[in-house]
Image (cartoon, grey):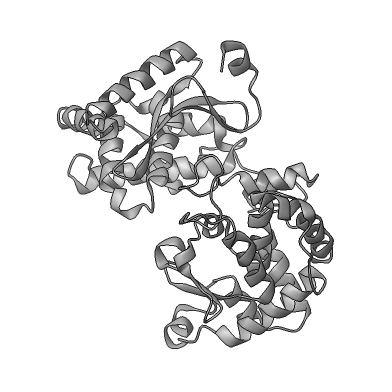
Amino acid sequence: MNNAKLKALSSPGRYADGSVRGLYIQVQKGGTKYWMFRYKRDGEQKYMGLGSYPVISLKGARNKALNLRKHIAEGIDPKEEKRKDEAVAAASSNTFEAVARRCSASREQAFRNEKHIWQWLRTLEMYAFPYIGNIKIGEIRHPDIVRLLEPIWLTKAETAKRTRQRIESVFDFAAAHGIFDRANPANIALLKDALPRRAKHLTKSKPHPAMPASQVPSFYAALCRQGSMSALALRWTILTGARTDETLKATWDEISRKDKVWVIPPERTKTYDEFVLPLTDEMMDLLDKLEEVRNNHPYIFWSPMAPDKPMSDATMRIRLRKMGIAVETASVHGFRACLKTWGLDQGFSEEVTEAALAHKFGNKVSQSYNRTDLLEQRRGLMAQYSLYVTGAHCAASQAERALL
């Protein structure tokens, strides 16, 4: 990485510096860039923000990262050290930023992983701290919140929504700890009349772009001619209807060949319930191919760059784009809609198609009494869908055999 290349980066994604291990530049939609430092501690992947570019230059980011590497070599966890420093600062300060960091630390047990913790705080660092970070929390009024939300309220509707919610959480936290005793200034009831009205198309949630179910077999056949691990992962995702994270973090010990099921543990599902997904003959064949290159790797879809880790969450999306599928045409998550649509068209019930996607069905009362997972009905759906997607069977190509 050099200054010219850094300045030219425009496509959203994470780019390694290449000079200092663990230093990355993250490019957001719209061109915003910020530095991120990634390191491993006690077997756990951790992230730290180092500031935005160009406020923090390439040289400055490298110096910060090198200093953090030095701390790691000395047995110091940089993130823990930062938290201690922040805790000391927070003890003597009730600015919005100080209280927000204490709030974030208190919520860490509720987050599913280190990345979610980092994302929660990063939103406030980008959109709230520059406006109200240095203001005592008791002095902040709802016009201050309006001022910080206005620039993104119409242009980044979802980001603005999350920012407001997280600011509201900080004030709730402050009230619970006795350092704030007024109406929450980030409450939507106080803000809605002060912020510009959004057009309906900005507030309406947009579903993930999905390829028409009729096009899935031809696309799957094209995937079978691809000789990459990302193509195999995408084939698995299409066949199973799994979420991206469920596929990429799948491990071999979750597979039961005897029972022909994939058991996804509760900590990796969106509903926090164990999900048993029936495996079809095509899925089993795919596992056989992957078994040939397992080499004792724990993950089924491992990263070629780091075999002891899963593939990047962008890998399958990039595979779609390389095959000429535009962003607005289809997404990896959209293949779940293909399974659902095809299943309903074939006469499978709403309940079975929802269960196949690990969705809750019915109201809470109904869910509390309905204890069946409809495994056998789902097995029938998945078997027929597999035959449809593969055109009865998808022969492995020479390119794929060469990879494996």
> x and y percent of residue 186 in the render?
40, 42
Q: Is residue 60 above or below residue 138?
A: above
State which quadrant residue 236 falls in: bottom right
> x and y percent of residue 323 in the render?
78, 46
> x and y percent of residue 380 in the render?
67, 84
Q: Nearer the viewer, residue 160 or 394?
A: 394
The N terminus lies in quadrant: top right
Q: At 56% from the left edge and 37% from the top edge, which residue is drawn?
A: 153
Q: At 73% from the left edge and 48% from the top edge, which residue is drawn?
A: 320
Q: At 79% from the left edge and 57% from the top edge, which residue is drawn?
A: 397
Question: Would residue 381 appear left or right of 371 to someone viewing this image?
Answer: right
State which quadrant residue 284 falls in: bottom right
Q: Is residue 375 above or below residue 267?
A: below
Q: Is residue 283 above or below residue 194?
A: below
> x and y percent of residue 386 in the render?
72, 73
Asked whether the viewer can see residue 193, the reply is no
Q: Nearer the viewer, residue 386 or 308?
A: 308
Asked whether the viewer can see residue 239, the reply is yes
